Image (spheres, rainbow, N blue to C red):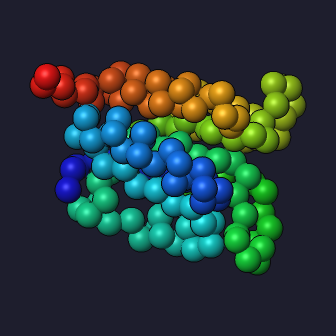
């Protein structure tokens, strides 16, 4: 297992599944693990029990802000903020990419206001046309942190 990891968290299982291969490719080329979660149920506990030896130290997390349990037992729309706090306890220097459909450009947006306490790389509006932006942001963020891609042999 690699020493470092990228964490991708979204409660839309189909989105995690559809993005996972592309994200994994970008991480693999840089020698970084990809850890994904698609259910808020038990997520904070899983992060609190994070095994750095098995999963690696999270250096970048791509997180949706509006996370809910599949069974609706925790209808908490600011769940992403709790996730960010929990990940910060594992690695104080973790960077975040927010990938959410529920953030507006308004300065009084409650998500934007809550996010000021975290090390953000960027906020990406979750919509189909922005998948390439997400992948490019992941690559650039990892490159900036010194996780350069291994050149492909042709």
Number of marks present in the image shown: 0
Q: Residue at 77% x, 36% y: name it.
A: 103
Q: Horizontally, is 11 left or right of 106 in the view?
A: left
Q: Horizontally, is 47 left or right of 68 in the view?
A: left
**Looking at the image, which is closer to me, 17 or 79?**
17
Measured along the vertical axis of the image, is residue 106 above or below residue 30?
above
Q: Position of residue 140 (x, y in %)?
A: 41, 22
Q: Residue at 82% x, 31% y: name it.
A: 104
Q: Residue at 57% x, 74% y: name it.
A: 42
Measured along the vertical axis of the image, is residue 111 above or below residue 41?
above
Q: Which residue reaches farthest left?
A: 153
Q: Position of residue 16 (x, y in %)?
A: 54, 52
**Looking at the image, which is closer to me, 86 or 67?**
67
Q: Position of residue 49 (x, y in %)?
A: 42, 71
Q: Horizontally, is 140 left or right of 40 in the view?
A: left
Residue 66 in view, yes or no:
yes
Rendered-image quadrant of the N terminus: bottom left
Q: Position of residue 72 (x, y in %)?
A: 78, 73
Q: Which residue reaches farthest front?
A: 154
Measured along the vertical axis of the image, is residue 70 above or below residue 29?
below
Rendered-image quadrant of the C terminus: top left
Residue 115 in view, yes or no:
no
Q: Residue at 51% x, 45% y: name it.
A: 19
Q: Horizontally, is 16 left or right of 129 in the view?
A: left
């Amino acid at each position: 297992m690699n020493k470092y990891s990228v964490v991708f968290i979204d409660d839309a299982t189909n989105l995690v599944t559809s993005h996972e291969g592309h994200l994994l490719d970008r991480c693999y080329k840089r020698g970084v693990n990809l850890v994904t979660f698609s259910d808020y149920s038990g997520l904070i506990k899983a992060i609190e029990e994070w095994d750095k030896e098995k999963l690696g130290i999270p250096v970048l997390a791509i997180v949706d802000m509006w996370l809910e349990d599949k069974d609706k037992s925790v209808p908490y729309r600011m769940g992403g903020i709790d996730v960010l706090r929990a990940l910060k306890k594992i690695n104080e220097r973790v960077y975040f990419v927010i990938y959410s459909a529920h953030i507006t450009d308004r300065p009084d947006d409650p998500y934007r206001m809550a996010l000021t306490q975290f090390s953000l790389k960027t906020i990406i509006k979750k919509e189909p046309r922005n998948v390439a932006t997400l992948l490019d942001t992941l690559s650039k963020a990892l490159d900036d942190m010194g996780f350069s891609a291994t050149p492909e042999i042709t």
